[in-house]
């Protein structure tokens, strides 16, 4: 474990694809040093600006299915016809080393993490409106109309799961949304369960 035997904190961010989640996450990572982003595995094709091992580990369906069998995922889900999964080893190792870990995963994955890691903070990040989500999705110019419609329909389903989350952040301005997520992480740092170790010599619990 890391300094003060402190286990790292786990933060889950979900939200409709195309809503500007990656931009906000990049801003959060720039401002909170030492925050680790867990690079997921996926069977989806890389987009133009994506690099293997950076945004995702891009693998074949066959490899992904093998990894499921080998129980290599802490959670995985099928989203718009592709598999996405979080590496169990990577997350547990980082938390054990006292590092904070951020997961960008969809709602089924978030539900699984909530069960397995009850101390995790679950944040739902959404654009200010559906109209704005549609505008952002179209602005990306990387997907067909069919994919865009699929993502909008999926977003509607995901909104039904918002009550499962602990926090709701509206992504109107990137800096404000990132600021709220950083504030949530700061509050998580101050939880009694995260800090008791720091004063264990002063108290006998
Ligand atoms: P995209 O294809 O737009 O990169 O991602 C599609 C969705 O998959 C997003 O909602 C993203 O949060 C989610 N996602 C990415 N990695 C994982 C993962 O490891 N597990 C789960 N359950 N969802 C993921």
Image: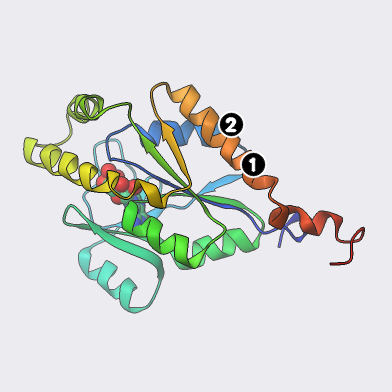
> Along the horizontal axis of the image, is 1 left or right of 119?
right
Q: Label 2 vs label 1: CA separation?
A: 16 Å
Q: Nearer the viewer, residue 11 or 124?
A: 124
Q: Residue at x 28, y 47 (%)?
A: 160
Q: Residues within 10 Å of mark 1 (few under 14, many from 20)?
A: few
Residue picked out by circle 2: 31
Q: Nearer the viewer, residue 128 or 77?
A: 128
Q: Is residue 158 above or below residue 88?
A: above
Figure quadrant of the N terminus: bottom right
Q: Position of residue 78 (x, y in %)?
A: 23, 60
> Along the horizontal axis of the image, is 199 left or right of 12?
right
Q: Residue at x 38, y 48 (%)?
A: 163
Q: Is residue 100 above or below residue 125?
A: below
Figure quadrant of the C terminus: bottom right
Q: How many marks?
A: 2
> Along the horizontal axis of the image, is 154 left or right of 52?
left
Q: Residues within 10 Å of mark 2 (few under 14, many from 20)?
A: few
Q: Nearer the viewer, mark 2 or mark 1?
A: 1
Q: Quarter of the image holding residue 30?
A: top right
């Amino acid at each position: 474990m890391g300094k003060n035997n402190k286990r790292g904190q786990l933060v889950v961010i979900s939200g409709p694809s195309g809503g500007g989640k990656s931009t906000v996450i990049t801003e959060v990572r720039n401002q909170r040093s030492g925050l680790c982003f867990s690079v997921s595995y996926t069977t989806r094709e890389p987009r133009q600006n994506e690099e293997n091992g950076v945004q995702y580990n891009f693998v074949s369906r066959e490899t992904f299915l093998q990894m499921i069998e080998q129980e290599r995922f802490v959670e995985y889900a099928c989203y718009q016809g592709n598999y996405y999964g979080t590496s169990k080893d990577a997350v547990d190792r980082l938390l054990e080393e006292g590092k904070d870990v951020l997961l960008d995963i969809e709602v089924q994955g978030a539900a699984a993490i909530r069960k397995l890691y009850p101390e995790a903070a679950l944040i739902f990040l959404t654009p200010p409106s559906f109209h704005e989500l549609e505008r952002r999705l179209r602005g990306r110019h990387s997907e067909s109309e069919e994919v865009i419609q699929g993502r909008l329909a999926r977003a509607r389903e995901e909104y039904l799961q918002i009550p499962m989350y602990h926090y709701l952040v509206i992504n109107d301005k990137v800096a404000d949304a990132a600021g709220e997520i950083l504030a949530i992480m700061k509050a998580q740092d101050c939880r009694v369960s995260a800090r008791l170790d720091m004063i264990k010599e002063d108290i006998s619990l």
